[in-house]
Amino acid sequence: MARSWLIKKALNPPVQHPSLQAAAAAKAHNDNNTIEMKITTPLLLATASLAVAGTPAPAPAPAPLPPPGYAPITLLDGRLTVDVQEKMRFEGRENNFDFNNAINGPQDATWLLNRFRLGLGLQMTDWLKIYVQGQDIREFGGSRPNIPGVLGAEGDDYFDILKAYVQVGDIKKGFSSTIGRQFLSYGDQRLVGPLEWLNQARTFDAVKLRYASSKWQFDLFTSSPVVFNPTQFNKSQYFDTDEPSQTLFSGAYLATQFIPFNLTTDLYVFNKRDQGNADFGPVLDNGDTDFWTIGTLWKGDPKKLAGFDYEMEMAAQFGEVSGRDLSAFAGHWGVGYNWLNHPWKPRIGVQYNWSPGDGDATDGDLNTFQNLYPTNHLFYGYMDTTGWINMHNPQLNISFQPSKKLKVMIDYHLYWNDDNADAWRRVNGVTAVARNAAAAKGASTFRGQEIDLTAIYKFNPHVALQAGYSYFLPGDYLTETQTATRGDDSAHFAYVQLQIDF
């Protein structure tokens, strides 16, 4: 069934809407004028960064989270490193956004995504490191406009700067500071992560201080998220005067290993601030934003718990969002069992994710959780219909490794709204699958169920192939709240991805 559906989508792409055709034509006209600037500017910046460095010396890994098997090419006795990544993903989607067989929109199609990265690292001394990484992303096929974020598109962004930072200090001796464009990743990435599933990923212009010992690590940072622009050099929100929001995101994160049976026990506090914001997170009101997130993450070690593992993350928020008083909460709890001595390394687990909704949008208070900058694709279903907002999400998770190179995962999800007076929002925490219409308040809260089948095969430490298929069966909420454009038909998602890292 999945195979015939995917072939059908590839052979019969949807007809592009006239407005999208016009946008695409305008974009094509501008590309010839902008591609030279998009390529030349980052290369000049990279060259300048390395020129300032002077004498080279073993370079840093392109922090913070290199892919498995990552091993950069080293030159000049290890002082200069070169890393390369090529990722291609062919995917097809049907009804992922509208659950409606009667409408064949731009999101109901197949396309090919490509991402190329080239990084250069230089270690001047034991305490001074420089790293620059460029990225080029493209989307081929389908009829979505090739603009990141528009109609779910990953889009085009010609060669631009993804990372460019200076690291001062020696982390082996405890202290380091990282200044410049960089990834931020904390805990399981439920609140802060680089979102590597997307072609463009997520990066920040930031200043980060870190102190680490054998049992704990403490980070302090302040940052602004980078906005990807297909025709201009990418800038962060705070420093781009053309952006409607000037966001500052800061925090402190403590990761410890003080509890013997835990892999990690973390405490954190984040602050997000935007003066005069017009469109912030899932709230579409004018007004200032300044709120805090306080939370903790605990993860048990199955090797010290007779094969059992557990996870718990809870976060509370308070402050102001778009002029409304914020008081919100989100929680994650999970437990599993690992057959540690079995050659296939099977694991079975259950988990529950919850975040309350806002029951009254007119009272001046806000109880909708603000999901910050997560990698939500990892957690709430690979079809990306759900964020950590106004939801109940119990799961069953099964994984096993038939060989050292192959891993198989099966995940089953159930979804409910917490409160029909609040919207059901997608994985980005902003786009609404269904808004809080008056007619929906008395409907069932059951959104539906999803099953994800995933296989990952590692040919060697540098080359990995991943494939997956997901199926969403709508629940009574979609049936009882249908509109002229949103139905209650089942949805499909399938993909094949090849990634090469050196």
Image (cartoon, helix red, strand yellow):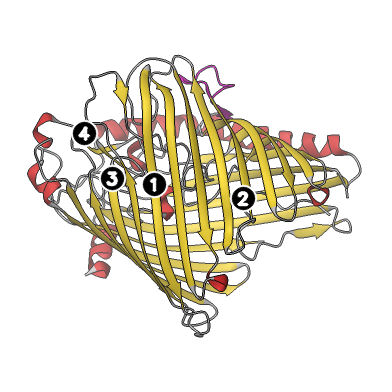
Residue 234 appears in the rendering: no
Q: Residue at x 30, y 34 (%)?
A: 20
Quarter of the C terminus within the rendering: bottom right
Calculate the distance from the C-alpha at mark 2 to the C-alpha at mark 4: 38 Å
Q: Nearer the viewer, residue 178 or 257?
A: 257
Calculate the distance from the C-alpha at mark 4 to the C-alpha at mark 3: 14 Å
Does the magenta segment cover residue 86? no
**Do residues under tags 4 and 3 come within 8 Å of each other at their CB atoms?**
no
Please state the extent of the stretch shown in magenta in the rendering.
Answer: 233-247
* Left or right: 278 as drawn, with respect to 491: right
**Do residues under tags 2 and 3 come within 8 Å of each other at their CB atoms?**
no
Secondary structure state at the residue bearing disc 1: strand
Q: Which residue is mark 4?
A: 435
Q: Nearer the viewer, residue 66 or 322?
A: 322
Upstream in sequence: badge 4 or badge 3: 3
Q: Nearer the viewer, residue 156 or 279?
A: 279
Q: How many other residues sit within 10 Å of disc 4, few (<14), some (14-19) or many (≥20)?
A: some
Mark 1 or 2, which is nearer the eye? 1
Q: Which residue is mark 2?
A: 117
Secondary structure state at the residue bearing disc 4: loop
Q: Which residue is mark 3?
A: 391
